[in-house]
Amino acid sequence: MKELIVRGPGRLVWEESPSPTLSSTASALVRPIASASCDLDRRLIAGVTPFKPPFALGHECVAEVLEVGEEVTTVRRGDLVSVPWKIACGYCAQCRAGRATACTSVPRHAAYGVPAGGHWGGLFSEVVHVPFADAMLVPLPPGLNPLAVASASDNLTDAWVAASRPHAAREAARVLVVGGTESLGVLAVQMAVAAGAASVDYLDDSDYRCDLAARSGANVSLDRVLDERYDVVVSATRDPQALYRGLLALAPGGHCSCIGILFDDPKIPLFGMYLRDVTLSVGVCNVRPHIPKVFELVSGGHCDPLLVSPTVVSCDEAPEALIQPLAKCIVVRERIT
């Protein structure tokens, strides 16, 4: 089978690799048919992260199930499933506590598409091994477009959790989304609207993304000074100064969900945050429990993930398309089941 391998900065190649096999009676083999680029992927390809090549790329996809172990009960051959980015067993103490991102049955940080916790393959590959099928895979409802939820494995669900969780505790919340990544900010706008925010403002220096945010329901014409006016801030930026500005924009009792990955420690206005009794959450999202809700939102037309994924390409086109700027890209292959 073929895997899409990061070989070095700007070097993406399809390479032949041994096809995986079932590792246990609880595992499954799946074939990605709609794989989306994560906002992190272009930095992985560019070589500006701590993760060193070579490694298989990809951690967002919808796949068809090819084979399951005899203990698997929730999916069978031919089913379409979302494959969460994180490898997790579902039964260890951390998984049972809702922290599958800290699963103790596998090496720390074990995930698809990055070599942080070992090499688990990537979700652009022709065949992917899922070690804990019942705990990880989420079947698609009938009629749901696989392309629309290709990113439910990570970015799309991350945006929903970041926007909806703090909003649920703050009635008629005023929301600011600080953009700067390919998709997360615009998706967070859509999810804040879906969660019932009283208003959503969007801050970004990209005209392209501001247009997408406006089409998603945000106000993009903002005052120069934004301090202390927002109940919820979703920081989807790689820029430490933009994060800083978002934190200053929190109203008393507000909350900032930081979902943009910053590898260097940013400046944080802790004393000002202290005086306003505001909170900041940072952490990789445990997407698996929230994917069914995201399916419901997409099915009901409450969000439009394809707005940020205008490029759909074949596997042959993927190495070039995935290094292009601006937008998410979806790589498709035909079903065989």
Image: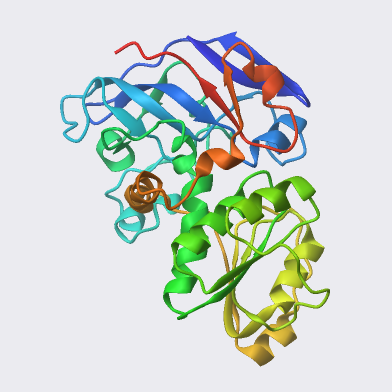
Name the residue at 41% across, 31% down.
Answer: 146
Front one among 201 and 315: 201
Front one among 233 and 217: 217
The answer to whether 137 appears left or right of 71 in the picture is right
Measured along the vertical axis of the image, is residue 68 above or below residue 210? above
Q: In this orientation, does residue 119 appear?
A: no
Residue 194 picture quarter: bottom left
Front one among 147 and 11: 147
Measured along the vertical axis of the image, is residue 309 above or below residue 193? above
Q: Position of residue 337 (x, y in %)?
A: 29, 13
Q: Position of residue 76 (x, y in %)?
A: 21, 25
The answer to whether 44 appears left or right of 2 in the picture is right
Residue 258 picture quarter: bottom right
The answer to whether 244 appears left or right of 40 in the picture is right
Name the residue at 40% across, 16% down.
Answer: 20
Q: In this orientation, does residue 289 appear?
A: yes
Residue 3 picture quarter: top right
Q: Where is residue 27 in the image (x, y as percent from the top left)?
A: 28, 28
Q: How many labels does the image show?
A: 0
Front one among 122 and 248: 248
The answer to whether 51 appears left or right of 56 in the picture is right
Q: Residue furthest bottom?
A: 275
Measured along the vertical axis of the image, is residue 65 above or below residue 157? above
- Colour scheme in use: rainbow
Q: Where is residue 325 in the image (x, y as percent from the top left)?
A: 75, 34
